[in-house]
Structure formats: structure tokens, C-alpha cells
Amino acid sequence: MTVDNEQLKRWRLILGQSAQEQLGNYGGDCGLSDDQKIMDEALAAIYDESDYGDDSGSGGKRGASLGKSAPQLAKWLGDIRCYFTEDVVAVIQNDAIERKGLTQLLFEPEVLKNVEPNIALVGAIMALKGQIPERTKETARMVVKAVADKIKRLLEQKIRQAVTGALNKKRHSPIPHVSSIDWKTTVNRNLKNYNVEHGKLIPERFYFFSRAQRSNNHTVIVDMDQSGSMAESVVYGAVTGSIFASLPALDTRVVVFDTEVVDLTEKCGDDPVDMLFGVQLGGGTDINKSVAYCEQFVTDPAKTLFIMITDLYEGGNEAQLVRRLKEMRESGVRVLCLLALSDSGIPEFDNRLAKKLSGLGIPCFGCTPNKLPELVEGALRGDDLTALAMRITASVKGS
């Protein structure tokens, strides 16, 4: 049997030093090149238990510990970025934090600046931001900004088009919309047409605001669960909220909650970084309290879209929560519950409460960021929300 040496070496990199003798029994050469030895050490640093950067190469039991040394961490980051693709680097970094507890990645500016920015890393920064030393905070903000800017570039134009398309769905109609009437100008310019006999002003011509001048036609409220399991959803939700806030046609509120409620609307602006640094991941969950807070912003139910982003594990008053959401929906508010707004799938959620809300006509489902513009457009346009949720869910599963 012909042995493929390159394939043996790949298996050697996957299985580590402990598998070298067994792989050698196949009769091929599974000895690693100098570059492959560096790759092996970098992987061992996370997935096994010896010292990374040991000059002995891969001669001992495969394993690693990156220890406390910032220069050693920086070398390791440089090695994995040199030898692996961006998506693989992101996975290895995440494992470094989760498997080895290498929060030092976030504490040393010379280390953090070499990290590949990604959603999971931003989640870690948000969770540990209170522990990040002052000398590292600016670098941490740069990492968060890089990820937020990337998401914004991917979503902003599509969301703008979706909102514009939904709210201007009659833009080709020759009949102007009544909500666009400029009453002050119309009255002033038709005073000459006042009919004394009938005691009425009979307009000869109506004057309308241009669509560009209209603002705050609809209210969008984004209410986000900031428990640790929702980190990726919160990042996407915050960036989405900042995009909504930049649109003059929408009056946007962005709220986060655990057992307390924090209104981040004033931090939206055009830059979601401040908003993300206002999030504190972890803690309990009181969804009912957050919904009660958000109710005050519903001034025109028929023109309000309420988006909850939560796994529905309620630590507060569930019965009251269900009643509030039921009343909100019956008043005309478009209510959606996103169990996840992420690319990594739907986290564990309270299936029982999700079914209860779905029975009230409040769809509970996961949505990937690339499907969000379609969701927003359909919701603002007045589509059936249950059918819309089923269509988006089906398209996500089929992709």
C-alpha cells in the first residue's frame, strides 16, 4: 500500500506528538518540517499541556501553556496568524480564551493589537471590560470598533434600503399621502378661498412635505437581553440599533437588560462602540421589567415595531410579561422575539415560553444578520409576522 506522506503529516498535526509513533507504523514519513513544527507548537499551546515555544521543538509530549508572558502570547498570536486562515485563527483565539482562560489576551495592549478582531472576541471584551487595565482600554476599543465597522458595512446599506422600501411603498402613486400634508402652508396659501357662507376654508391646492423632510414616521424599539449567552446577538443588535438611529424616518430606542434596565439610546449616534461599552454581559434576567420600561415609548401602536432579542429565560414575573406582550400586540404594535441574532445558531432557550408567545401571535425565532433587512422590511410593511418568520427561518435552514 502506498503511503501519502503529506496526509500522514496532516494527521500528525491534528493528533499531536503522542500520535507520531503510531502514525509511523504505517510505513511513511510523518516528520514535520520547520514550519509545521511551529504550527504544531501553536496548536499544542491551546489543545494540550506543555510549554509553548520550548526550544526542544515537538520532541516531548504534545501540550502547551502560554503562561503569563505577554511576549510569548504575542509570538503565539503572530504564529497562528502566519500559518492559518482568518476563520481558523478566530476559532483558535476563541478556544484560547474558553479552554485555557487566556484573558491575558485582553489585558496587554501589545497582545491585543495582534488579535484577529471577531464577534466572539468582542463578546469577551464586553464581559471583562471592568477588569481590562487602563493601558489596554484604547486598544480594546480599536478591536471593538473594527468588528462593529465591519458589521455596519455589511448591513447598513441593506437596512437603509429595506426601511425606505417599506415606508415608501406607495412612492409611485400619483396620489400624495395624507400624512405628508404641510397643513400650515396649505392653510396660509388658501386663506383667500375661505367660504363665508359655509364658514369653512375650501383649499384650492394642498401642499405636501417631501419624503426627505418627513421624519420619525415609525418607532423601532430594540430590547436586548445582555446575559452572557446572548453576547453575539447583542453585538449585532447594538450595531443594528445604531443604523436604525441614523435613519430620520425612524424614532429608535435601544435598551439592554439583565435584572436592571439600561437605556442606551443616547449612545447610539453613528458609532455603536460607545453603546457596546455600555453593555455589561452576565447577571440575571428580568424581561418583564424591560418590557414595562419600553411601553412608555409606544405612542402610536400601529407605527411601532418592538424587537426583543432574548433566550426567554425569565427570572422576573412571567405571567405579567405575557400579559404585557399580549396587550402590546393587541394594541397594534408589531412584536417580534429573536431568540438569536447571530451566525452561530440559536442558543438554548425557554421553549415553553416561546410556544406561549407564539400562540399569542408573537413569532419567536432565530435570525441571521443577513436576513435582518428582509425581516425589518416585512415587519414595517405590515406583512403577516408569523408567515414572515416562517419564511425567514426556512431560508436560513436552506442556506
Image (spheres, grey):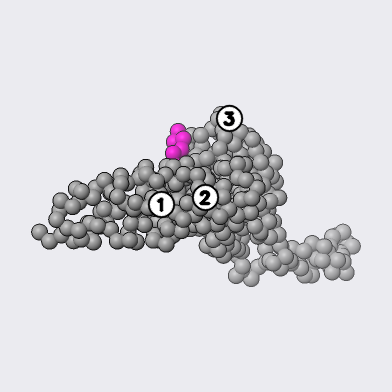
* Residue 377 lies in quadrant: bottom right
What kind of residue is marked 1? Gly
What is the distance, in whole Å, between disc 2 and disc 1 at their CAs?
13 Å
- Work out which quarter of the rendered image holds the N terminus and state it: bottom left
Q: Which residue is at 42% across, 57% downward?
A: 80
Badge 1 crowding class, 10 Å Cα cut-off, few under 14, some 14 to 19, many 20 or more, is many
Q: Is residue 329 visible?
A: no
Give whichever of 232, 322 is nearer the camera. 232
Comes first in the chain, label 2 or label 1: 1
Q: Which residue bears the numbered disc 2?
A: 70
Residue extent of the magenta highlight: 345-352
Secondary structure at numbered mark 2: helix
Q: Are marks 3 and 2 in contact (CB under 8 Å)?
A: no
What is the distance, in whole Å, between disc 1 and disc 3 at their CAs?
50 Å
Horizontal and vertical percent position of residue 265: 68, 49
Q: Which residue bears the numbered disc 3?
A: 316
Q: Residue furthest right?
A: 196
What kind of residue is marked 3? Gly
Q: Are marks 2 and 1 in contact (CB under 8 Å)?
A: no
Secondary structure at numbered mark 1: loop
